[in-house]
Image: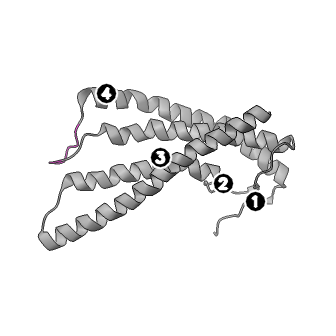
Amino acid sequence: MKHLLALARRIDAFTDRFAVVAKWAILAACAISAVNALVRYTLNYGSNAILEVQWYLFAVCVMFGAAQVLRVNEHVRVDIFYGLYPTRAKVVVDLLGLCFFLLPMTLYIGYMAMPLLIKMIESQEMSGNAGGLIRWPAMLTIPLGMGLVALQGVSEIIKRLGWLMHLHEMDTHYERPLQ
């Protein structure tokens, strides 16, 4: 288990790097949006490519940041009874959810995105907008993001198993969202 916990730490460090990319992507998207608005209203000039770069960066932010959200335990839960459970039951529920829902779905979505990504790369599909960009870089974020979430899911499974075996300490605090 010691080796698995070391692997979990390496996965955490790996997904942390992508979280930094996500943070910079959102900053860049905001800056581009501000400059785009300024140029459009002061110089009466607009560009579809600049608009599309903003949503490409947003795709990077969402897809690369999702693993970090899972790692820091800020992901969305369907919370009906979870908040009432004792800590051990919460960890078991998390473990089951990770194994039977998160991993299968992330792997399935990543797998299903690959043929479309390959088709886009081969055809060099372009945006339908005049002056638009090629589409595959945005599509690439889906399998990469799902792969990162799946990797982080493996890390979370290891950490929860370690916690259940009293070999790993983790923050099990859960704060129910405001309703």
Left or right for 81, reference 126: right
Q: Label 1: few (<14), some or many (≥20) within 10 Å?
A: few
Residue at screen point 35% across, 59% down: 29
Q: Earlier in the sequence, mark 4 or mark 3?
A: 3
Q: Earlier in the sequence, mark 2 or mark 3?
A: 3
Which amino acid type is marked by label 3?
Met
- Based on the displayed image, in which of its 4 quarters is residue 156 positioned? top right
Q: Give the residue at mark 1.
A: 173
Query: Can you tell which mark lies on residue 73?
Result: 2
Q: Earlier in the sequence, mark 4 or mark 1?
A: 4
Which amino acid type is marked by label 2?
Asn
Q: Give the residue at mark 3.
A: 63
Measure the C-alpha gap from mark 4 to mark 2.
35 Å
Left or right for 3, reference 25: right
- Chain part drawn in magenta: 126-131
Measure the C-alpha gap from mark 2 to mark 3.
16 Å
Q: Position of residue 9 (x, y in %)?
A: 68, 42
Q: Nearer the viewer, mark 4 or mark 3?
A: 3
Measure the C-alpha gap from mark 4 to mark 1.
44 Å
Q: Give the residue at mark 4.
A: 119
Measure the C-alpha gap from mark 4 to mark 3.
20 Å
Q: Is residue 91 visible?
A: yes
**SS assignment at label 2:** loop
Does the magenta portion include 153?
Answer: no
- Comparing 30 with 85, the one in front is 30
